[in-house]
Image: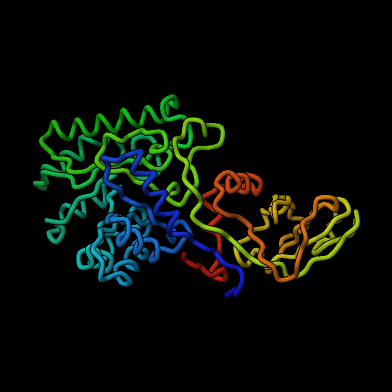
Amino acid sequence: MRFRSRHVIDLGIFSSNYQKLKEICPDNKVLLMVKADAYGHGLVAIVRYAVLELGINEFGCATLGEALKLREELAELEFEVYVFSDIQLELEECSEIYLNRRIIPVISNKDDLNFFLSNKKFERFPLFLKFNTGMNRLGISHEEIDSVVKLLKSNLRKSISHLMTHFSSSSLSMKKNKRCLFQLDNFKKIKERLISEGIVIENSSISNSGAIEQRVGLEETHVRPGLMMYGASSVIPKYSHLSCWDGEIISRLETYIIKHFKVTKGQPVGYGATPCPEDGVVAIIALGYGDGFSTRFMGSHLYHKGKKGIVVGRVNMDMAQVFFKKDDAPELIQGELFVVWDHDSKRFQTLADESKSITYELSIQLTSRVAKTYI
């Protein structure tokens, strides 16, 4: 583990983002997505804070292992946790975990639905059902609604605890994109059909972060915010004017300068003997691809004391080189703090763009060598 390279998570900003979310959707219950270690911010710490300080009591994971970790490490807290994708319901040991640890699988295929409905042990277990309305990833096809209704009625299921689907293109214009409109229409038809058959829909959700930002799908009981709660927008920059989101990045990635030195134009630096573009100074920072500071950051711009530098040469496993032009270089001091990103969401987005990445990946890709610190 690094001692001075840290991923600093500001829970105060996390709280502020939640208040901003509730201003957008004050009447909706929140099912907070915390998959992939809470988008790289620490699963247990984020859920503990969300329960105790924000009053959130529903959380979505991708895997049963994530959900079980929450149950084991936060056993004293009251909350609900759902597994969205890797449910493995057919495995006996997994079924027993769902039944005994109050973890709810989101059913998204007919085989799992058959198993769930025909198994006496799940007779009184909440049914969370996901339909594929056009994303074509997970979910029971909207075209199979007849067979789903038949299954529910033949197994005397009179209600669905939570009905949901997932948008494929909420990063685009929700009110003009044909795929989004197609999915909205399909979900409406699914609900109408179930209700017409006397099946009660207790809760429903369709809005992920991008949809929430564009105020779409808020007529359902729940919203399912993910990335936006951690600060970044899910709407691509081209359509940023359609988003009402102004959250802040809840984390700061900081490291320190191991060494600095002057360079002349053409002087080779690091692996591959990459020539410097002009005269200036180079700062060696204590982050490399072994920390999740990917080789894709080569050519990206970083800032120090208000001055813009650029990552030159190959990113190493343990360090990287940041070049500053001679006439616009900050004072560099060996051992001083160097911030890779802070709470500025626009600069965070730019860093993702320049590294040919997406904002989702920046914090998720950090490895365990970079300690998490909470303030």
On the rendered structure, is 75 left or right of 250?
Answer: left
Q: How is the image coloured?
A: rainbow
Give the vertical position of 125 relative to 133 (above or below): below
Q: In this view, does 203 lie to the left or right of 74?
A: left
Identify the residue shown where x is 33% and y is 66%.
Answer: 70
Q: Where residue 278 sits in the image (x, y, percent)? A: 88, 51
Name the one closer to the observer, 31 or 5.
Answer: 5
Residue 152 screen position, x and y as percent: 15, 44
Residue 192 percent coordinates (x, y) = 20, 30
Q: In which quarter of the image is residue 21?
A: top left
Tell me what residue is drawn at x 78 percent, y 60 percent.
331
215 or 140, which lies in front?
215
Q: Can residue 131 be seen in this view?
A: no
| 6 horizontally vs 278: left or right | left
Residue 174 visible in image:
yes
Figure check: 93 above or below 138: below
Marker count (numbered): 0
Residue 99 image-quadrant placement = bottom left
Q: Which of 71 and 129 is in front in this view?
A: 71
Q: Nearer the viewer, residue 127 or 276?
A: 276
Left or right side of 180 for 288: right
Q: Above or below — where is 153 with respect to 143?
A: below
Q: Position of residue 272 (x, y in %)?
A: 82, 61
Q: In the rendered view of the protein, which quadrant contains the N terminus?
A: bottom right
**Where is 329 relative to 142, above or below?**
below
